[in-house]
Image: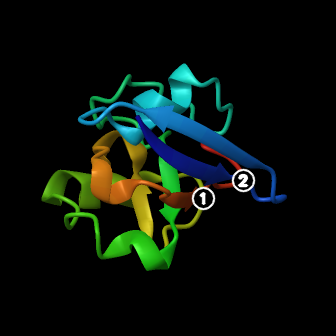
Amino acid sequence: MITVHLVEPGGTRHTVQGHEGQSLMRAATAAGVDGIAADCGGCMTCATCHVYVDPAWLGRLPRPSAEEDSMLDMTAEPRRPNSRLSCQVVLDPTLEGLVAGLPESQY
C-alpha cells in the first residue's frame, strides 16, 4: 500500500492508502474524501478531481499529457503551476507520502 495525504483548504488532513497502479483519484474516492468529486469516474472529461500537488513532489510525477493540460484549464478553482487531475496521478512506491491540497470547490 502507498500512503498519500490530501489536505483541505482549512488544513484538515486525510491520510489515504492506495495500491500501486491505482490513481490518486480512485484511492481518494474509495477512502470517502469529499473534496474529490470525480464526476466522470476518471475518464478525464470533467476536471472535478483537481488537486494542488505539493511542489516538493512535482518532480516525481510525469509531466501532464496534452489532454490533462487542456482539462486543467476547465477547473472550478484557479489553475496553479502545481495543479493536476488526480485521475492522472498513478500511485507507485516513489509517491509514498505524497502531499496534495484540495481546492475550495470542484464546481
Mark 1 residue type: Glu
Q: How is the image coloured?
A: rainbow
Determine whether, in the image, residue 64 is placed left or right of residue 11. left
Which residue is situated farthest in the left direction here?
Answer: 66
Q: Earlier in the sequence, mark 2 or mark 1?
A: 1
Residue beneath disc 2: 104
Determine whether, in the image, residue 21 is placed left or right of residue 54. left
The answer to whether residue 107 of the structure is visible from this angle is no
Near mark 1 (Cα within 10 A), the count class, few <14, some 14-19 or many ≥20, is: some
Query: What residue lies at 26% left-to-right and 61% top-to-bottom?
Result: 69
Query: What residue lies at 18% left-to-right and 51% top-to-bottom?
Result: 67
Q: Is residue 86 above or below residue 53?
A: above
Q: Is residue 41 above or below residue 80?
A: above
Mark 2 residue type: Glu
**Residue closest to the eye, 67 or 93:** 93
Which quadrant of the rendered structure holds the N terminus?
Answer: top left
Which label sits on residue 77? 1
**Residue closest to the eye, 64 or 5:** 5
Q: Is residue 56 above or below residue 21?
A: below
